[in-house]
Amino acid sequence: MVGKNIVLTLVVAAAAACLGWEKAPAAWTPLRIFGLCLATAAFVLWSAARFQLGNSLTVSAQARQLVTRGLYAKIRNPIYVFGSLFIAGYILLLDRPRWLLMFLVIIPLQLWRAGKEARVLEATFGEAYRAYRARTWM
């Protein structure tokens, strides 16, 4: 699974770098600099969350193990949180703030997915998951 995480991380990084290079701003405004900083930090944290999830990373909601270490010690869904922040930062980097309206669709979808995963985890891990949920955000 580590190999797949590395490959996906490199593919996303390469695609983001190529698009960033192609669409590099002529003028670096404070908004674009903020977007670059946000996207970079979010990408690093998104990647870390994916690696910390290990073999529990799946496309569909499955309960292989209850991961409560690293970023997961504070945030139940750091992949969703940092993935969304990466997109937001990239939108600002490209100087297309109107595109942030897409979060009117993305956020409800992420909340729906997170709820679906929570039900699977609670059904599998019961009280251990409820205690984890009580001490974490999102």
Image (tube, rainbow, N blue to C red):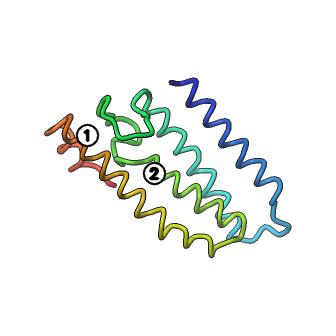
Residue at position x 52%, y 51% from top? Answer: 83
* Residue 81 falls in image quadrant: bottom left
Residue 47 rendering spot, x and y as whole percentages: 55, 40
What amino acid is labelled 1 in the image? Answer: Leu
Residue at position x 20%, y 35% from top? Answer: 125
41 vs 113, left or right, is right
**Which mark identifies residue 30?**
none
| CB within 8 Å, label 2 to label 1 | no
108 over 44 or under it: above or below: below
Residue 56 rendering spot, x and y as whole percentages: 39, 31
Picture mark count = 2
**Label 2 vs 1, first from the N-terminus:** 2
Residue at position x 60%, y 30% from top? Answer: 6
Find the residue positioned furthest to the front. 60
Q: Name the residue under label 2.
A: 80
Residue 111 rendering spot, x and y as whole percentages: 37, 58
**CA separation, marks 2 and 1?**
16 Å
**Which mark identifies residue 121?**
1
Residue at position x 58%, y 44% from top? Answer: 44
* Residue 100 falls in image quadrant: bottom right
Report helix, strand or loop for mark 1. Answer: helix
* Residue 31 falls in image quadrant: bottom right
Q: Which of 28 and 97 is in front in this view?
A: 97
